[in-house]
Amino acid sequence: MIGFAAFLVVCAIARDTAYPQMSLWAVVYVLYAVLMIWLGACLVTATSLEKTAGVLAACILAGALANAMAGVIQFYGRPAWLEDVVADLRGIRAYGNIAQPNLYANYLALGQAVLLFLWARGRISGVATWCAATLLVWAIALSDSRAALLYVLWFAVLGAFSARGQREGEMRRLRWAALALGAAQLAAYVSVPWFNHLFDLGPAGAGTYEHLLNTFGDLRWQAWMLALRIFAGAPIAGVGIGEFAGAAFEAGLPREMTDKFEVWTSPHNLVLQLMAETGVVGAILVVAGVGAWCWQAWRRYCVALQRAT
């Protein structure tokens, strides 16, 4: 990650960009991520992996539940006395106080994961766990984020691996809980819009199944192909941080994309955006760093089965 930050500095100096601050802030964010990784390692060394994970999980769960409640209130009608606490709903997708439906769903899915972790450690009772899980599942469905389907797959895969070779014990309970949560999220993705439509709840048009019909016909396929075209034009170092929108305009946005959004600031794919804006060098540095972290976590998990891992 430090190498990636250094690479961004070199690119900022070498390029004659109109707004070099974009590259500067990108470097600051990367270095901030490095400090967060370092802090996590120091906390684990000072205490333990289980204790560190427990504290972080409790904080994440508190934030996720607060935002889930905010999203539900926002979607079904925010009372006047909460207008300084809960953001106003613009559109038909809940986003809580995160201000973006997909990031909102991502945050709540992380809350679901830590909820299962705390339940497996015995920090939360079964009744409280399933009440909290119901709130999180329902709130994610209100976001109408198709990423929720990926979280279903994520929970299923992690659940299948969490208790490999064990016939009983806490890890086996964790596996079945993860699979149940994934199934509940899938059911909510289909049933919550129907429920809202049946009782005429939420904003107009929110209770339709348009999100299901458009799952495989989305404009993001075109955005991904556009990102590959931009990458092909600058494969080594990319077009620069924050330059995707301008490069996409110059490459020729299809009419369908401009009808939906006048400006596309990203292809809605992290790897493709890295490739387009930082080229193969930047993409390899980031993907290698994430890959190394995943490999170390997997090795640690294989040596000793730990819920925190």
Image (cartoon, rainbow, N blue to C red):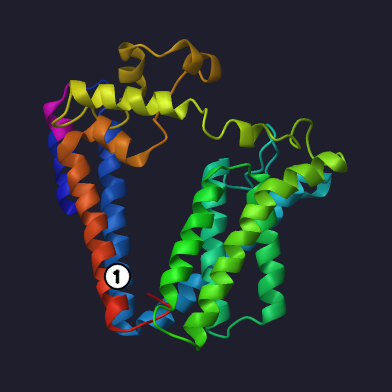
Closer to the camera in the image, 304 or 281: 304
For badge 1, the amino acid type reads: Ala
Closer to the camera in the image, 231 or 59: 231
Work out whether 232 lies above or below 80.
Answer: above
In which image quadrant can residue 209 be found? Answer: top right
Position in image of residue 175 (x %, y %): 51, 74
Q: Is residue 68 left or right of residue 222?
A: right
Closer to the camera in the image, 70 or 305: 305
Residue at x 52% of width, y 84% of height: 121
Residue at x 24% of width, y 29% of height: 240
Per the rendered image, the range of residues in magenta is 11-16
Mark 1 element type: helix
Position in image of residue 278 (x %, y %): 22, 35
Residue at x 28% of width, y 77% of height: 300
In which image quadrant can residue 11 be found? Answer: top left
Work out whether 269 lies above or below 248.
Answer: below
Question: What main secondary structure does the magenta stretch of the protein show?
Answer: helix
Position in image of residue 128 (x %, y %): 70, 76
Q: Is residue 216 left or right of residue 136?
A: left
Residue at x 54% of width, y 58% of height: 109
Instruction: Inspect the magenta stretch and tell me whether residue 15 lies in it.
Output: yes
Q: How would you rate the neighbour count of disc 1 (Cα within 10 Å): few for under 14, some for 14-19, many for 20 or more?
A: few
Work out whether 246 lies above or below 272.
Answer: above
Q: Going by the picture, which residue comes out furthest to the right?
A: 199
Q: Can see residue 117?
A: no
Q: What residue did someone put label 1 on?
A: 297
Marks counted in the figure total: 1
Instruction: Inspect the magenta stretch and tell me whether residue 175 lies in it.
Output: no
* The C terminus: image quadrant: bottom left
Position in image of residue 100 (x %, y %): 56, 40
